[in-house]
Image (cartoon, rainbow, N blue to C red):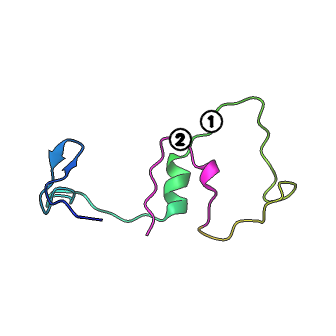
Amino acid sequence: MIADAHARYFGTELKERSLLPRDEAELGEIRFDDWLGRTARPIPNANVQPAAAGRGTGRSPLKENEFRIGEVPPGSVLLVG
């Protein structure tokens, strides 16, 4: 692999701080469960029945701070780290 300092990112050449927030950015902290509870909206589908937590699905129950990617609403943004 050869690095190219002039490679374009979505059509523009990046500078050292191009993808970093500026000084006026409002930064905060929120736990994933809190954020998900505040932003998640059920996807309307009359044919889907909610499964009991881990029962009858062949899946083990989730631990604290775990989630299944298939259950994240479309258009959500995940910050993992």
Who is closer to the viewer here, 8 or 79?
A: 8
Where is the N terminus found, in terms of image quarters?
bottom left
Q: Name the residue under label 2.
A: 74
Residue 48 rendering spot, x and y as whole percentages: 76, 36
Q: Specify the farthest residue to the right.
A: 56
Where is the C terminus found, in terms of image quarters?
bottom left
- Tag 1: amino acid: Ile
Contact (Cβ within 8 Å) of mark 2 with mark 1: yes
Quadrant of res 59: bottom right
State the CA–CA distance, disc 2 to disc 1: 9 Å
Task: Tell me which residue sits at (18%, 59%) in the image.
Answer: 4
Task: Tell me which residue sits at (49%, 56%) in the image.
Answer: 35
Q: Is the magenta stretch mostly helix, strand or loop?
A: loop
Residue 46 rendering spot, x and y as whole percentages: 75, 29
Q: Is residue 71 in the magenta section?
A: yes
Task: Tell me which residue sits at (87%, 55%) in the image.
Answer: 56
Q: Specify the farthest residue to the front.
A: 1
- Give neighbour class at mark 2: few <14, some 14-19, many 20+ (Cα, 10 Å): few
Label total for image: 2
Residue 36 rendering spot, x and y as whole percentages: 53, 54
Q: Specify the farthest residue to the top.
A: 46
Question: SS class of the residue under badge 2?
Answer: loop
- Choose the circle earlier in sequence order: 2 or 1: 1
Q: Magenta part of the protein: which range?
A: 66-81
Residue 22 rendering spot, x and y as whole percentages: 15, 58
Who is closer to the viewer here, 69 or 41?
A: 69
Q: Mark 1 points at which residue?
A: 43
Task: Tell me which residue sits at (51%, 50%) in the image.
Answer: 38
Q: Which label was assigned to residue 2?
A: none
Who is closer to the viewer here, 2 or 75?
A: 2
Residue 47's place in the image compared with 42, above or below, is above
